[in-house]
């Protein structure tokens, strides 16, 4: 579970990844899942974007963020996310629309193995800002080391 009591500055220092589960309400008409900012995700949701029509051999990501926090979902289909906090590499498979991956700032991420028709939805703590990206792994690693993460 996410620690909803952690402050933004505490989360920003850590470089953390956590799996989160959203509520589900099922009845004979189908399933309903909802997400509320600052309740199910530990930030105000300032942006939502989604990836779709992704070729199955596509590789996305390949960057980290200075400040941005996100929660990533597979609304349909599946894909893999490989993460790296500068010290530890992990991998996660997203395939359940009510199970998301919280990815804090200072986490390098790469996404691949998209299934046919996969839809990835991302909830983000900030509006789009290209200057928030580390698109060079070496730069990311250097910052991670400087902050004591590697
Ligand atoms: C992440 C993974 C999961 C925008 O103009 N606005 C936006 O909100 C976003 C996300 C992107 N863009 C532009 C920037 C690039 O010119 O769309 C283009 C493709 O973006 P990018 O190559 O960063 O896309 P992905 O799929 O590699 O990465 C995205 C997010 O950027 C990233 O934060 O974690 O999805």
Image (tube, helix red, strand yellow):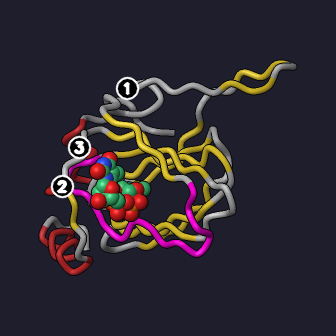
Closer to the chain start, of discs 1 and 3, is 3
Check if residue 59 falls in the magenta segment.
yes
**Within the displayed image, which quadrant is ligand 1 positioned in?**
bottom left
In front: label 1 or label 3: 1
Q: Secondary structure at mark 3?
A: helix
State the residue position of label 1: 38
Q: CA distance from mark 3 to mark 2?
A: 18 Å
In front: label 3 or label 2: 2
Q: Position of residue 123 (x, y in %)?
A: 41, 39
Check if residue 63 falls in the magenta segment.
yes
Q: CA distance from mark 2 to mark 1?
A: 22 Å
Q: Is residue 86 visible?
A: yes
The crowd level at tag 1 (other Cα within 10 Å; few <14, some 14-19, many 20+) is: few
Q: Position of residue 132 (x, y in %)?
A: 18, 55
Residue located 37% across and 26% down the image:
38
State the residue position of label 2: 132
In front: label 2 or label 1: 2
Closer to the chain start, of discs 2 and 1, is 1
Q: Decide if ligand 1 comes within 8 Å of the CB at mark 2.
A: no
Q: Which mark is residue 10?
A: 3
Q: Does 82 appear above or below 24?
A: below
Q: Position of residue 13 (x, y in %)?
A: 21, 52
In the figure, is residue 125 to the left or right of 93?
left
Residue located 50% across and 44% down the image:
121
Q: Which region shows up in magenta?
A: 53-68
The crowd level at tag 2 (other Cα within 10 Å; few <14, some 14-19, many 20+) is: some
């Amino acid at each position: 579970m996410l620690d909803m009591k952690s402050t933004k500055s505490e989360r920003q220092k850590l470089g953390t990844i956590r799996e989160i589960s959203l509520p589900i309400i099922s009845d004979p008409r189908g399933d309903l899942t909802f997400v509320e900012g600052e309740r199910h995700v530990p930030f105000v949701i300032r942006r939502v974007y989604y990836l779709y029509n992704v070729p199955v051999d596509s590789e996305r990501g390949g960057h980290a963020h200075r400040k941005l926090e996100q929660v990533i979902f597979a609304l349909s289909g599946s894909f893999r996310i490989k993460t790296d906090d500068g010290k530890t590499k992990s991998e996660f498979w997203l395939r359940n629309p009510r199970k998301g991956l919280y990815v804090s700032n200072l986490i390098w991420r790469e996404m691949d193995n998209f299934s046919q028709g996969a839809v990835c939805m991302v909830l983000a703590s900030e509006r789009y800002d290209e200057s928030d990206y580390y698109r060079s792994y070496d730069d990311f690693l250097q910052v991670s080391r400087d902050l004591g993460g590697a």
